[in-house]
Image (spheres, helix red, strand yellow):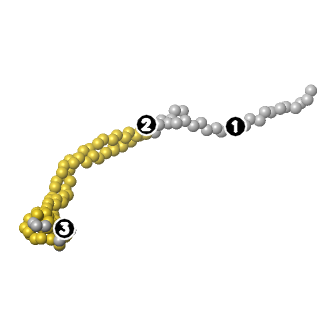
């Protein structure tokens, strides 16, 4: 028999165990607000003034619609039977644009989202 003695060698190894632990909670709440506001702006209106200008002039051909300054002139014609047919300028319509600005106020609703965030720390105690 041999006198050899075998001594086992013991070796330690470190391991890490991980686990999830809640440390805080977060709450998110949304709410909506509405606000009645008035929107102000200006609108533009145009109206046309018509002035009838009698003419009663004989013309060889129909005059074209024309513009003089801010007046648009529209010829009004008629044919008359004389011994021969002739063209007469009966009248002219003078059209003048007038622009007026008017302030308007209209109610409208504006919506806005509000967000509230709350954090709550949780008591964490490690168990041994």
- The numbered mark at residue 12 is 1
Q: Position of residue 21 (x, y in %)?
A: 50, 36
Q: Which residue is mark 2?
A: 123
Query: Seen in the image, is 34 located left or right of residue 104?
Result: right
- The numbered mark at residue 62 is 3
The Cα–Cα distance between marks 1 and 2, rounded to whole angstroms, is: 34 Å
Q: Is residue 93 visible?
A: no
- Among numbered discs 2 and 3, the one appearing first in the sequence: 3
User: Closer to us: mark 1 or mark 2?
Assistant: 2
Contact between labelled residues 2 and 1, with CB atoms less than 8 Å apart = no
Is the residue marked by circle 3 packed among few (<14), some (14-19), or many (20+) residues within 10 Å? few
Q: Which quadrant, please, contains the N terminus?
A: top right
Q: Position of residue 95 (x, y in %)?
A: 14, 65
Task: Look at the numbered disc 1 and give the secondary structure of its residue.
Answer: loop
Task: Look at the numbered disc 2 and give the secondary structure of its residue.
Answer: loop
Is the residue marked by circle 2 packed among few (<14), some (14-19), or many (20+) residues within 10 Å? few
Give the quadrant of residue 76: bottom left
- Among numbered discs 1 and 3, the one appearing first in the sequence: 1
Pick whichever, 14 or 1, lies toward us: 14
Q: Position of residue 100 (x, y in %)?
A: 14, 62
Contact between labelled residues 3 and 2, with CB atoms less than 8 Å apart = no
- Among numbered discs 1 and 2, the one appearing first in the sequence: 1
């Amino acid at each position: 028999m041999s006198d050899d003695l075998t001594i086992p060698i013991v070796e330690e190894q470190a391991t890490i165990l991980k686990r999830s632990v809640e440390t805080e909670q977060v709450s998110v709440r949304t709410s909506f607000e509405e606000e009645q506001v008035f929107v102000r702006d200006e609108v533009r209106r145009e109206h046309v003034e018509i002035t009838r200008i009698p003419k009663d002039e004989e013309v060889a051909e129909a005059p074209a619609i024309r513009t003089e300054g801010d007046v648009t002139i529209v010829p009004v014609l008629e044919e008359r039977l004389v011994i021969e047919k002739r063209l007469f300028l009966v009248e002219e319509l003078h059209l003048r644009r007038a622009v007026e600005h008017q302030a308007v106020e209209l109610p409208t609703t504006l919506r806005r989202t509000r967000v509230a965030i709350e954090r709550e720390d949780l008591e964490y105690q490690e168990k041994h």
